[in-house]
Image (cartoon, rainbow, N blue to C red):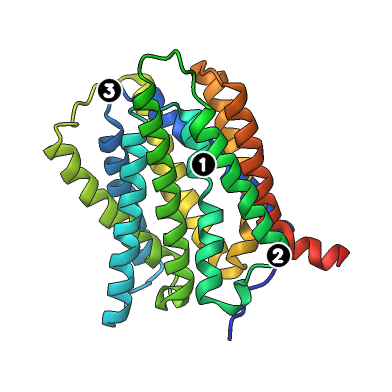
Amino acid sequence: MDQRKSIDTYATMFMMMLCAIWGIQQVAIKGIATEISPALQIAIRSIIAAILLWILMIYKKEYFTTSLVYYKSGLVVGILCALEFFFIAEGLRYTSASHMAVFLYAAPIFAAIGLQLFLPEEKLALLQWGGIMIAFSGVAIAFLFGQNLDTSNLNHIILGDFFGLLAGLAWGCTTVVVRSTALSSLPATHTLFYQLACAGGLLLLYACFSQQYHVHLTKSSSLSMLFQILVVAFLSYLTWFKLLKKYFASQLGTLSFLTPIFGVLAGVIMLGEKLELSFIIGSCLILIGIFMVNSYPWMKRKFI
């Protein structure tokens, strides 16, 4: 029987912290892209975080189950995670961190659609379907009109934005697999290890074959990598999967609409990125749609 519960103060507090961390991570990657390629950054942080996680698992005496079912599901989420990170890395080569933050964190919408196909308790209400329509309208506006048409590299920006959407889709699919397969009964450390190890190995191979392996260590690049390894890849993802196993996945996204806000603000403040009016309008529609989808259970308890 599913023992997950609705979000509470504890979940809200940690989701706020995760939103800030995840919003800033795009800026952390983009900010040192000329010193360490994005693909190599994510590969390094994933591999080192996987090693740290392995040590933690040994310390806590959490041993892998030998069942083939878990390995198959673990491989699936590992490949999905690798795809997500690949699209983030490639997308940030072409588009801004602000754009990536908005398109990537459309993931809760994809997750909500996928979850209601497999789990009865995650079925969407009419209001939530309305939120999905609004969110995708925002995606269309931000994607099709949220560009400066005088920009010489417009095609690159559109490609980067599209990669951001694909990264969000991969992340949403990862959530669906974790919640609807045998992985839902495993400790959070196991699920995260499958993703980090697989994504790190695959992206390292990609970085080598695509010759994206240049490294120039400076104070800023070293600090950025430490932040990505310890805070993003290790602590934040571990916390996310712990929450995912305790609370309803669709409800955990209630506050996730804050993540793109943090990301956009960080991009503007730290990288000096410029935003187009149409992109801002589209982003607001995306956030409204995400809020409608993920806050419905709370609104139902309070007002319906």
Residue 63: x and y in percent read 33, 74
**Could you tell me residue 143's position as x and y percent?**
49, 34
Q: Secondary structure at mark 3?
A: loop
Q: Amino acid at mark 2?
A: Leu
Instruction: Please name whichever residue, 65 or 87, is drawn nearer the observer in this view of the structure.
Output: 87
Q: CA distance from mark 3 to mark 1?
A: 23 Å
**Labels 1 and 2: the sequence-earlier one:** 1
For residue 288, which quarter of the picture?
top right
Residue appearing at x 36%, y 49% in the figure: 84
Instruction: Quote the CA–CA distance across marks 2 and 3.
Output: 52 Å
Q: Nearer the viewer, mark 1 or mark 2?
A: 2
Disc on res. 22? 1
Q: To which residue does mark 2 refer? A: 126
Residue 54 percent across, percent down from the top left: 32, 60
> Callout 1, which amino acid?
Trp
Identify which residue is drawn at 43% across, 74% down.
186
Residue 40 horizontal/vertical position (percent): 25, 36
Vertical comparison of 94 with 46: above or below? above
Position of 9 relative to 236 (above/below) = below
Any mark on residue 217, and which?
3
At 86% across and 67% down in the image, what residue appears?
304
- Whether residue 219 sits left or right of residue 121 in the image: it is left
Q: Earlier in the sequence, mark 2 or mark 3?
A: 2
